[in-house]
Amino acid sequence: MTTTKAKTTDPRLDRSQATEWSSWFEALSDPTRVLILNLLAVESKPLTVGEITEQLDVGQSTVSHHLAKLAQVRFVTVQRTGTSSHWAINQACIEGFPSAVDVIMGRASR
C-alpha cells in the first residue's frame, strides 16, 4: 500500500522573490520617498512633479530622482502627455506589499 503525503507549501522564499521584495524595502528606506508615496495615496489622483514639489519641502530635481527610484520597483506609474508627466500610485504593487510582509515574516505562504 502506497501512502501519499499531502503537499505542503514551503514557507521559505526563493532568491528571486527575496531580491525583488528587498528592493521594495530599499525604496522605502528614504523618508522623502515615503512622503511622496503617502501624498500620491492621499491625493488619489496623478500629480505632476511640480505639484508634488509644492507640497513637500524638497526641490524638483530631488522629487524627480525619488520618483524614478519608486518607479524602478513599480510603486508608482507615470503617464506622459506632451511635456507633462503625471505620477500615480501603482495599486497592484501597493496592495501586494502587506502580503509580501506577511510571507517574509512567516505568517502566510507564497
Image: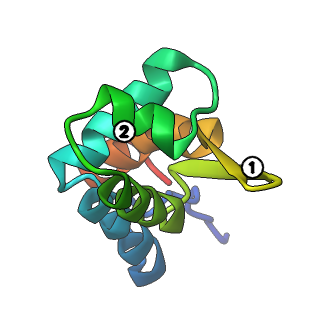
Residue 12 in view: no
Relative image position of residue 42 (x, y in whole percent):
45, 17
Determine whether the residue tagged by mark 2 lies in a helix, strand or loop.
helix
Q: Are marks 2 and 1 in contact (CB under 8 Å)?
A: no
Residue that sits furthest to the bottom in the current view: 15
- Res. 44 visible in picture: yes
Q: Residues within 10 Å of mark 1 (few under 14, many from 20)?
A: few
x%, y% of residue 37? 39, 37
Q: Is residue 35 left or right of residue 92?
A: left
For mark 2, does the 10 Å Cα neighbourhood hold few (<14), some (14 to 19), or many (20 or more) residues? Answer: some
Question: Relative to 86, is 16 on the left or the right?
Answer: left
Identify which residue is drawn at 38% across, 77% down: 19
Q: Which residue is mark 2?
A: 53
Under circle 1, the secondary element is: strand
Quarter of the image with the N terminus is bottom right
Residue at x 36% of width, y 72% of height: 18
Instruction: Name the amino acid type tagged 2.
Output: Thr
Per the image, the residue denoted by label 1 is: 79
In the figure, is residue 103 to the left or right of 78?
left
In which quadrant of the rendered view does residue 107 lie?
Answer: top left
Label 2 vs 1, first from the N-terminus? 2
Residue 8's spot in the image, x, y percent?
Answer: 50, 57
- Amino acid type, residue under disc 1 in the picture: Gln
